[in-house]
């Protein structure tokens, strides 16, 4: 399952009448944030800056889990771990699939919460 | 579920409406100031508590470098009725903690942040002498047991793992609120006890220990700034007769009345205490001998002018005598204080010998 809808649905109980507005707001900041983090990971790869790459992957990992994108989050956990242990050169081929996975997540989220 | 309708039922004379989860009251003399957030899942007791006393919203500082998580915690807590402050790094949080005029007592901080992380922030808070306890919740995606233990040992009060369930966050914040309320209760009780330990319960004046402490501190200050210090030792004339003829309750009333006169006729910065039985001590910082004499006369005259209404009918005239001692230049050590008080006591004795209702000064 690309998205576990219950992650965001859990907020309905607390947010009540503001739930839709809240979820839209969270998703918007997720999309913006995710793109920034992808860009940071790209530039960290170019500069071969392991710390920056690992940090961005870590943040992206928990942001993705927050919106219920668990497979994407798992992918990022793997990148975080391998970045630390293997360095960045081996990870380059994994970036295009990551971007594809994010695009799918965005599509699916927009489908579920529209 | 709490809403304006159910509250209206409990508080029928309150005019209230709800806007964006905020309860607004429009009525005069409302038990709450102007707005109250309605916890979506709070219980009615909690709400009542908040209504009975003026609402002061708990301020929570949320520290996270991750935007989405920060936004979620902010929105959830605001909705639940908390005032939320935000910081995007440990450094920014530390700055806020130091700069915020009203102390921040509740912090929810992410663990993993560049430079100062959540653990370092919490350690810094624990090491600093901040007014009041700061309750901290560590937010972590490191859900391994040993990490949690490490966080708690570093000084966190609780932890929550990301991504968290909003109702769990609500419950954990409520726990923290409860702990802070307990601490506030203890602090209040302590302050009350401290105050009680200094006050003479009958007259409301300082007790012997407290007036002695005051005198000692003022003597020390007088020495530092080369100023005089005077004391007045005052005793009610024939107080034994008041007790014998009218009973101890009337005696107590006489003591209360005289304490009030002594207090009223002293300067705001003088120390006024009940020394023992019907003896009072006034400590006058900076007062030279003639000023202290005048003050003593004012008090003695005031007492002679006042009459105590007796429960059995009729009025009782009272009078008192006072001895004044002044140390015009304080040079010696603390032992001097006992000498000054003794001199005033001796002067008082002479005033009594001369017939009472008068003031005598020590020739020191």
Image (cartoon, grey):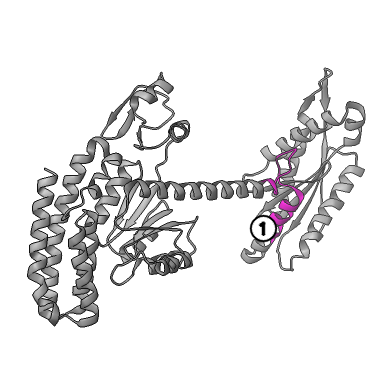
Q: Residues within 10 Å of mark 1 (few under 14, many from 20)?
A: many
Quadrant in which residue B26 is drawn: top left
**Tag 1 secondary structure:** helix
**Residue B362 can be seen, yes or no:** no
Which residue is labeled 1 in the image? B218
**Residue A75 can be seen, yes or no:** yes
Residue A60 picture location, percent across and down: 20, 63
Q: Which residues are magenta?
A: B196-219
Taking the image as shown, residue B76 lies to the left or right of residue B33, namely: left
**Count of marks placed on residues:** 1
Q: Is residue B207 magenta?
A: yes
Q: Nearer the viewer, residue B224 or A6?
A: A6
Residue B221 picture location, percent across and down: 64, 62
State which quarter of the image contains the N terminus of chain B.
top left
State which quarter of the image contains the C terminus of chain B.
bottom right
Q: Is residue B349 magenta?
A: no
Q: Nearer the viewer, residue B70 or A1?
A: A1
Residue B92 picture location, percent across and down: 31, 63
Q: Nearer the viewer, residue B116 or B45?
A: B45
Query: Dot 1 falls on which chain?
Result: B
Kindly give the residue lying farthest to the front in the view shown: A1
Residue under the image location 43 percent in, 23 percent down: B10
- Up the image or down, B276 lies above or below B153; here it is above
Q: Nearer the viewer, residue B286 or B190?
A: B190
Taking the image as shown, residue B252 lies to the left or right of residue B20, namely: right
Taking the image as shown, residue A69 lies to the left or right of residue B293, namely: left
Residue under the image location 44 percent in, 68 percent down: B123
Residue under the image location 15 percent in, 56 percent down: A2
């Amino acid at each position: 399952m690309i998205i576990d809808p219950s992650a965001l649905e859990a907020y309905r109980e607390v947010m009540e009448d503001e739930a839709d507005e809240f979820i839209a707001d969270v998703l918007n900041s997720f999309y913006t944030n995710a793109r920034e983090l992808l860009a940071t990971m790209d530039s960290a790869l170019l500069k071969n800056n392991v710390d920056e790459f690992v940090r961005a992957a870590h943040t992206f990992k928990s942001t993705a889990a927050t919106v219920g994108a668990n497979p994407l989050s798992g992918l990022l956990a793997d990148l975080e771990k391998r970045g630390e242990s293997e360095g960045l050169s081996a990870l380059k081929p994994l970036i295009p699939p990551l971007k594809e996975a994010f695009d799918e997540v965005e599509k699916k989220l927009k489908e579920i919460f529209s | 579920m709490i809403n304006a309708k159910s509250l209206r039922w409990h508080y029928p004379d309150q005019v209230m409406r709800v806007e964006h989860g905020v309860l607004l009251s429009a009525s005069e003399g409302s038990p709450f100031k102007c707005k109250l957030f309605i916890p979506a899942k709070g219980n009615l007791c909690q709400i009542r508590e908040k209504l009975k006393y003026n609402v002061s919203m708990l301020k929570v500082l949320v520290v996270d470098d991750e935007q989405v998580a920060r936004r979620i915690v902010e929105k959830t807590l605001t909705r639940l009725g908390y005032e939320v402050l935000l910081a995007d790094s440990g450094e920014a949080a530390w700055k806020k903690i130091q700069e915020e005029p009203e102390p921040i007592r509740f912090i929810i901080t992410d663990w993993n942040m560049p430079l100062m992380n959540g653990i370092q922030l919490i350690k810094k808070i624990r090491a600093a002498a901040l007014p009041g306890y700061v309750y901290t919740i560590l937010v972590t995606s490191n859900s391994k047991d040993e990490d949690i233990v490490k966080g708690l040992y570093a000084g966190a009060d609780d932890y929550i793992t990301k991504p968290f369930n909003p109702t769990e966050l609500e419950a954990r914040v409520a726990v923290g609120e409860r702990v802070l309320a307990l601490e506030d209760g203890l602090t209040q009780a302590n302050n009350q006890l401290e105050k009680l330990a200094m006050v003479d319960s009958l007259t409301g004046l300082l007790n012997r220990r407290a007036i002695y402490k005051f005198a000692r501190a003022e003597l020390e200050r007088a020495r530092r700034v080369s100023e005089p210090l005077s004391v007045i030792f005052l005793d009610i004339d024939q107080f034994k007769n008041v007790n014998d003829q009218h009973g101890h309750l009337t005696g107590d009333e006489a003591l209360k009345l005289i304490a009030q006169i002594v207090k009223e006729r002293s300067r705001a910065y003088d120390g006024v205490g009940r020394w023992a039985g019907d003896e009072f001590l006034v400590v006058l910082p900076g007062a030279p001998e003639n000023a202290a004499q005048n003050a003593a006369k004012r008090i003695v005259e005031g007492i002679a002018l006042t009459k105590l209404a007796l429960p059995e009918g009729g009025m009782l005239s009272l009078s008192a005598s006072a001895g004044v001692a002044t140390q015009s230049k304080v040079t010696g050590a603390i032992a001097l204080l006992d000498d000054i008080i003794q001199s005033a006591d001796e002067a008082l004795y002479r005033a009594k010998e001369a017939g009472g209702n008068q003031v005598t000064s020590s020739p020191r």
